[in-house]
Image: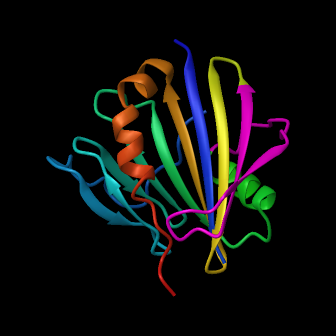
């Protein structure tokens, strides 16, 4: 099955890692949530949230092998933030880093940079944005069928992703 992996990094200032806390139960409606550093977003109805000290892992309904991951880092630039997030999520992956494409910040993020990778059986994109002194990196690791099926859920998450207010 072809998989798509999108990593979105936002800066304010294999298998997935094992969560340190039990996953939250499935939400019956979109629900607000915050990462360990205070980045806020909406969890789509039916998704499961698991967390480690640095990662928030969202798993869509009916596909335990697909994830949206939010990683928090104080790395000094978008590339270092991307590398730190990937090392936390998939340390076994050794990918050649592509050139990043800059985009204007939005929703309180000062800057955004997106990196697109080609990985066997996956499409892998990393975006980074900066606000309030740290980066939040979002990684989409989704099967192609899931990403197409869950496009509205992706909008729910990323249209409502905001850095912690200073």
78 in the magenta segment: no
Q: Which residues are magenta?
A: 90-118
**Place of residue 118 in the rendered image (x, y in percent of width and height, measured from the top left):** 74, 26
In-image side of 144 versus 149 (left or right) = right
> What residue appears at the point 85 percent right and 36 percent down from the top-left corner?
96
> What residue appears at the point 64 percent right and 26 percent down from the top-left corner?
123
Residue placed most toward the observer, 84 or 161: 161
**Place of residue 107 in the rendered image (x, y in percent of width and height, measured from the top left):** 49, 65
In-image side of 23 versus 2 (left or right) = left
Where residue 5 sits, quadrant-wise, is top right
The answer to whether residue 11 is above or below residue 71 is below
> What residue appears at the point 23 percent right and 41 percent down from the top-left corner?
46
113 in the magenta segment: yes
**Place of residue 92 in the rendered image (x, y in percent of width and height, measured from the top left):** 72, 39
Residue placed most toward the observer, 97 or 155: 155
In-image side of 94 versus 160 (left or right) = right
The answer to whether residue 90 is above or below residue 137 is above
Query: What is the image's colouring?
Result: rainbow
> What residue appears at the point 80 percent right and 35 percent down from the top-left corner?
95
Where residue 4 sits, quadrant-wise, is top right
**Place of residue 90 in the rendered image (x, y in percent of width and height, measured from the top left):** 65, 43
């Amino acid at each position: 099955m072809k998989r798509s992996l999108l990593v979105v990094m936002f800066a304010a200032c294999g298998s997935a890692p094992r969560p340190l806390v039990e996953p939250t139960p499935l939400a019956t409606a979109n629900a607000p949530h915050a990462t360990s550093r205070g980045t806020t977003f909406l969890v789509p109805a039916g998704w499961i949230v698991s967390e480690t000290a640095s990662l928030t892992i969202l798993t869509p309904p009916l596909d335990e092998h697909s994830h949206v991951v939010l990683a928090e880092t104080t790395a000094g630039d978008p590339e270092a933030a991307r590398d730190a997030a990937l090392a936390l999520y998939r340390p076994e992956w050794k990918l050649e880093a592509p050139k990043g494409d800059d985009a204007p910040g939005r929703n309180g993020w000062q800057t955004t940079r997106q990196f697109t990778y080609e990985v066997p059986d996956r499409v892998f994109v990393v975006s980074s944005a900066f606000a309030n002194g740290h980066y939040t990196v979002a990684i989409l690791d989704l099967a192609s069928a899931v990403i197409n099926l869950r496009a509205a859920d992706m909008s729910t998450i990323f249209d409502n992703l905001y850095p912690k207010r200073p």
